[in-house]
Amino acid sequence: MSISPLARPFHDLPPVAGVRLGPATAGYKNWTRADVLLAEFAPGTTVAGVLTRSKCPSPEVEWCRRALAGGSARALMVNAGNSNAFTGSAGRDASRAQVEAVAAAVGCAAGEVFVASTGVIGVPLPRDKAVGVVAAARDALGAASFHDACTAIVTTDTFAKGATATAVIGGVRVVVTGIVKGSGMIAPDMATMLGFVFTDAVIAVPLLQAMLADAADRSFNAITVDGDTSTSDTVLAFATGAAGNRPLESLDSSGADAFAAALREVCTTLARLVVRDGEGATKFVTVEVEGAESDAAAKRIALSIANSPLVKTAIAGGDANWGRVVMAVGKAGEAADRDRLEIRFGGTTVARNGAVVAGYDETPVANHLKGQEVEIGVDLHLGRGRARVWTCDLTHGYVSINGDYRS
């Protein structure tokens, strides 16, 4: 598979104290690459997470939802090539068996093990492979980089995706590093893919949970490739506490703002990288909506535009069809006044006050759409609500990838 034309290079990510990584090969598909990642965390590591709101979640999602209540983590196991979703008791039993094998391997309680799986829906996780690979992953702990970890968890991704940032808490520098996988079946409904964030900060579980939920809403919940939400979407944040900073207990704690900003930066970078690897994508699209009745309304309108196949195919073809943007605004179900609506492509306003602008010249818009970075702006002139979401174009490549996905 060729690398996405929108790909960004993977920069070295610094290690996070208290985290050891171990990729291994279970052989879930006909490949020889690593397709399992085991991460081991130092005792005392805390965890927060956001999980798919799909009504047909995988057993791994259900397990993580229960385990998050404990707030403690010692291990993470990620399987690539098999989502284990919609697999009945066989899938649940295989997932539980893998959890218990990991717990025994690292010496912790089963409730401190977190799991995630990604790949084909409807095929049970092969129990023998899922359990048998644990020993190899444990033996590999400590020698792997974050790049190794990224490449072990991908499916249709064409490049590895990682990000890092730092924050200073009471004079102590802490690291926030994240990796993500995702390319298709991407739509905002919590956090649309598998993403894992690691930090050496000392932070209370309720605060980490609140910060992660806020960061996800601004990032992972603001991207869409194809409008489809996975049964396996999971984002987890692990805090080892190895930095030894004064504990962050609340938003009023010294350094809390800096940590929250670093977490948002990492999540936003990761989310945008997912869009850049959208299946078949050739253009990275930013949709900005302002002047809505509320921020929530602006976001729903922005997503209506970003998810429209007609808008996305027009962008793929370089067609400056602003009428399709009008359509997407009108169907969003939010307040809009046709005669106040303003639309722009890049820096060029194409429509204002419910009509095309006088003397409209399509040339600069057409030139803008030839580039890899496309901007669509909408002003409803109704209020102060605003939102920004990211998407990509819809091409024949998306159809080819997904038409052949299981073959």
Image (cartoon, rainbow, N blue to C red):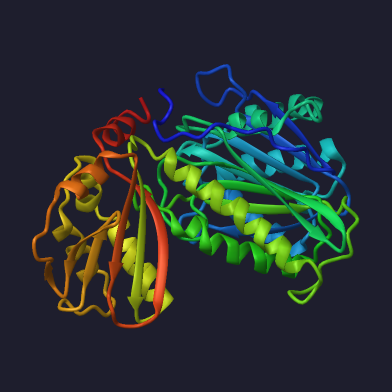
Give the residue drawn at x 72%, y 30%: 145
Q: Position of residue 254 (x, y in %)?
A: 81, 71
Residue 99 on image: x %, y %: 72, 43
Q: Position of residue 374 (x, y in %)?
A: 32, 48
> Can residue 239 be seen by looking at this rendering?
yes
Q: Residue furthest left?
A: 359
Residue 232 in view of the camera: no
Quadrant of the rendering where the C terminus is positioned? top left
Could you tell me how many numbered marks the image carries? 0
- The residue furthest top is 32
The quarter in which the N terminus is drawn is: top left
Residue at 87% x, 64% y is 170
Which quadrant holds residue 164? top right
| For residue 166, side relative to residue 382 (left or right) | right
Query: Looking at the image, which is closer to me, 287 or 150?
Result: 287
In front of the other: 391 or 37: 391
In depth, the one of 6 and 25 nearer the eye is 6
Side of 209 relative to 397 (left or right): right
Q: Quadrant of residue 172?
A: bottom right
Residue displayed at 66% across by 61% down: 261
Q: Residue at x 20, y 78 (%)?
A: 340
**x and y, in percent, of residue 181 in the image:** 54, 40
